[in-house]
Image: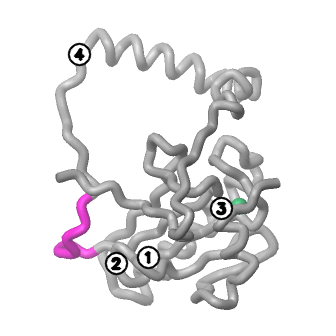
């Protein structure tokens, strides 16, 4: 087993601000947050990407994320949250340990999670809809899960000196 910065961080969780903990997950305050209260929710067991979690654990993680989001609304008096997973290196994941960002949001916080939008070609929309529907139905029924993710292809870049996930890729 290779060393994981997030696993190390979880082992030393008492050095951080723990917002929530149970036997499966731990939530820590981000020390370089997008906005104060930005919370990182990790599985205690080492999983690289969401596809490696069991359905039961996925359900638990997002139930807890929902409760943390609710608490952030009430405690910090914000008007929105982003509940964000960077899943894979191409999606901006910098450490090979699955986690969920819960980011408090206000109207004028200056955080940008926007992406360029362009009108999709109707034929491509139709084709992609059919293709995805087929694969989703297979994945939900369990028949095609292995096909959808090739685990050996999972590559996650890591910064040696930065134990925090860099979660925000800001658009210019
Ligand atoms: Zn880990």
**Ligand 1 shows up in which quadrant of the image?**
bottom right
Residue at 63 percent of width and 23 percent of height? 137
- Mark 4 or mark 2, earlier in chain: 2
How far is mark 2 from mark 3, CA to CA? 22 Å
Q: Is residue 58 left or right of residue 105?
A: right
Between 62 and 28, the one nearer to me in the picture: 28
Q: Residue 35 — which label?
A: 2
- Please indicate whether residue 109 sits to the left or right of residue 159 in the image: left
Mark 2 crowd level (few <14, some 14–19, many ≥20, 10 Å Cα): some
Q: Is mark 2 within 8 Å of ligand 1?
A: no
Task: Give the label, 4 or 1, closer to the camera.
Answer: 1
Please state the extent of the stretch shown in magenta in the rendering.
Answer: 106-112
- Give the distance between the C-alpha atoms of the residues marked 2 and 1, in whole angstroms: 6 Å
Q: Which residue is mark 3?
A: 61
Circle 3 residues within 10 Å: few <14, some 14–19, many ≥20: many
* Cα distance between the residues tagged 3 and 1: 16 Å
Cβ atoms under marks 2 and 1 closer than 8 Å: yes
Instruction: Give the labeled residue for mark 1.
Output: 38
Image quadrant in which you'd find residue 155: top right
Q: Kindly report the distance in space between the C-alpha atoms of the residues bearing marks 4 and 1.
A: 37 Å
Which numbered disc, 3 or 1, marks the residue closer to the eye? 1
Q: Kindly identify the residue that appears in the image at 73 percent across and 26 percent down.
A: 146
The picture places residue 67, in percent across and down from the top left corner, at 57, 73
Q: Residue at x 34, y 86 (%)?
A: 77
Q: Quadrant of residue 60?
A: bottom right
- Residue corresponding to mark 4: 121
């Amino acid at each position: 087993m290779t060393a994981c910065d997030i696993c190390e961080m979880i082992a030393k969780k008492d050095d951080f601000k723990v917002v929530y903990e149970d036997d499966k997950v731990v939530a820590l305050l981000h020390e370089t947050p997008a906005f104060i209260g930005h919370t990182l929710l990790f599985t205690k067991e080492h999983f690289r990407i969401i596809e490696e979690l069991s359905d039961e654990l996925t359900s638990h993680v997002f139930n807890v994320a929902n409760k943390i989001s609710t608490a952030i609304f009430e405690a910090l008096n914000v008007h929105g949250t982003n509940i964000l997973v960077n899943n894979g290196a191409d999606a901006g994941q910098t450490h090979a340990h699955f986690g969920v960002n819960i980011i408090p949001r206000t109207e004028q916080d200056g955080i940008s999670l926007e992406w360029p939008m362009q009108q999709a070609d109707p034929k491509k929309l139709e084709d992609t809809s059919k293709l995805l529907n087929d694969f989703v139905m297979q994945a939900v029924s369990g028949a095609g899960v292995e096909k959808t993710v090739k685990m050996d292809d999972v590559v996650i870049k890591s910064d040696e000196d930065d134990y925090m996930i860099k979660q925000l890729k800001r658009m210019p």
